[in-house]
Amino acid sequence: MVVYDCTTTRGLLDGVAAAVVAARSGKLVVLPTDTVYGVGCDAFDHGAVRALLAAKGRGPQMPPPVLIGSMDTLDGLARDIPDYARELAARYWPGPLTLVLLAHPSLQWDLGDTNGTVALRVPADDVASGVLGQVGPMAVTSANVTGHPAATTAQDALDQLGDSVAVYLDAGPSRGGAASTILDCTGPEPVLLRAGAIPAEDLVNQPDAP
């Protein structure tokens, strides 16, 4: 287990490189996001996803969301995407909005009991983007043990997850603090699943774009 100070140029470069190697090797990494700190792994590594759920103290009935580096990845992971979901993604990504969509059935991953869906988000964080840009889609959930407070610093995450994580990327206190807003976008209209950083009324009742 290694902690990298990503507030320095050298620490950032070394930390991102180490996180990429760890994720590609099936290990867990803690990284900052634009909400709270997250713990994640390669979304397509079945063993790593199981280790992620075990570190959180949860089972497959609570599958993790998937973070992606850009909206360009959306169509490769989700199918039958409603127009309103694309508009929400275009408006709020990168940002603290998670969209639950129908997953492509051909994807070779096992995130848990998803019922054929996937929760996707593009975080607005340079450190996270640096890792995602090299690893690809990552299963990432809040860096805390289930039932405990979300980690707003790397130390918070370390205190809870310890040696179950190979690399910790410390970018200072999280800028957000509130978790992402989650919308179910598998039907004709969006349904709020979790209130979060973006007010629900801003999402469900969209004004016309200028």
Image: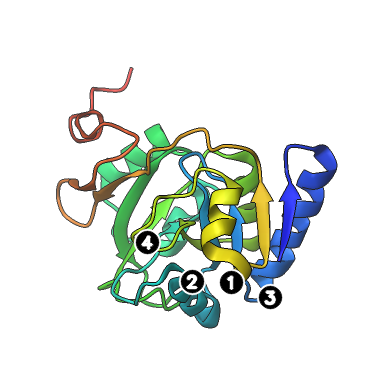
Q: Which mark is residue 55?
A: 2
Q: Amino acid at mark 1?
A: Ser
Q: Is residue 195 above or below residue 133?
A: above
Residue identifier under label 3: 25
Q: Amino acid at mark 2?
A: Ala
Question: Residue 184: x and y, percent?
Answer: 23, 53
- Residue that appears at 54% across and 50% down: 156
Residue identifier under label 1: 164
Tell me which label, 1 or 4, sits earlier in the chain: 4
Q: Nearer the viewer, mark 3 or mark 4?
A: 3
| Distance CA(mark 3)–CA(mark 1) | 14 Å
Question: Residue 153: x and y, percent?
Answer: 56, 44
Tell me which label, 1 or 2, sits earlier in the chain: 2
| Distance CA(mark 3)–CA(mark 4) | 25 Å
SS label for mark 1: helix
Do labels 1 and 4 touch, CB within 8 Å? no
- Residue that appears at 29% across and 45% down: 85
Q: Which mark is residue 78?
A: 4
- Residue that appears at 68% across and 75% down: 25
Tell me which label, 3 or 1, sits earlier in the chain: 3
Q: Nearer the viewer, mark 2 or mark 3?
A: 2
SS label for mark 3: loop
